Image: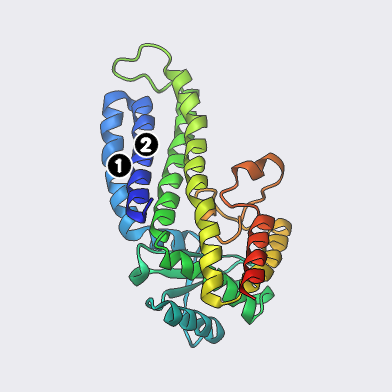
Amino acid sequence: MNSFVKTTFLLGVMTGLLMLIGGLLGGRGGIELAFVFAAVLNFGSYWFSDRIVLAAYGAKPLDASNAPELYSIVNELAQSARIPMPRLYLIDSDTPNAFATGRNPQHAAVAVTRGILRICDREELKGVLGHELSHVINRDILTSSIAATLAGAIMMLASWVRWGAIFGLGRGDEDEGGGIVGLIVIGVLAPIAATLIQLAISRTREYQADASGARLTHNPLLLANALRKLEASNERMPLDASPATAHLFIVNPLSAQGIARLFSTHPPIEERIRRLEHMAVNVQ
């Protein structure tokens, strides 16, 4: 499934969920209002999803003057990949992590936390940034960014739905009964549905970005070594991240222990490392 089809499918499903919530909150009028809201949100997420996500984490621009090593690594990888140099941003967090966003390689951005610059050496950073640039090259950053924006809206509206159930809202024009039950059901299931959509998209693309990033850096072990450090640090000190944007990061910024691992938007780190080590053996 190519990037255009994935994006179109994602927009359709998310729009349907928003309209369903609107119908439960306000009947036929709610559906119409939700459709208008979804259209505006779809337009905004296509053109401005990168700015929305970066602003949500208070990311600050970086350049060659205030981050020379980081700029040098990204510039080198971008030239090797034959894509424009993406914009660089810093997130002021001690938890090591990174993500890429933007609608295409000409409008891409890579954000890193202060923590990842502290614990990773140059070679490990190269592995991480190779992974993130691979998301740009593979053109899946648009899908991921739109998913983050729309999932956030769905989770917010689902919260309103639950409050609506408490205060007895949710009876549409032709609904004389069952409105409260419907509100409760959709208030619980809508965020789960949004998460499952993110999960289905995210896990596959993480494996793909690991593999193409390893080829870009010519050494799969660079990323494997970095992933070990990032996983250990994020388990000790999870990033203060929104579940709606968790799938953007190179490792899950949220605590994922026990049953929560089943709903993690990221594949298991140990499996990612195993695949990278297998690649390293085969390229020797």
CB within 8 Å, label 1 to label 2: yes
Furthest toward the top, the residue is 176
Q: Residues within 10 Å of mark 1 (few under 14, many from 20)?
A: some
Residue found 42% across the figure and 59% down from its top: 140
- Vertical position of residue 135 compared to residue 130: above or below: above
Residue found 29% across the figure and 18% down from its top: 173
Separation of marks 1 and 2 at Cα, in angstroms: 8 Å
Residue 35 locus on image (x, y percent): 28, 37
In this view, the residue in front, 248 or 274, is 274
| Sequence-first disc among 1 and 2 | 2
Residue 80 locus on image (x, y percent): 45, 81
Residue 69: tell me if it is visible.
yes
SS class of the residue under badge 1?
Answer: helix
- From the viewer's perspective, is 153 left or right of 283? left
Q: In the rendered image, which residue does mark 2 sit on?
A: 18
- Quarter of the view holding residue 260: top right
Residue found 43% across the figure and 40% down from its top: 154
Q: In the rendered image, which residue does mark 1 sit on?
A: 37
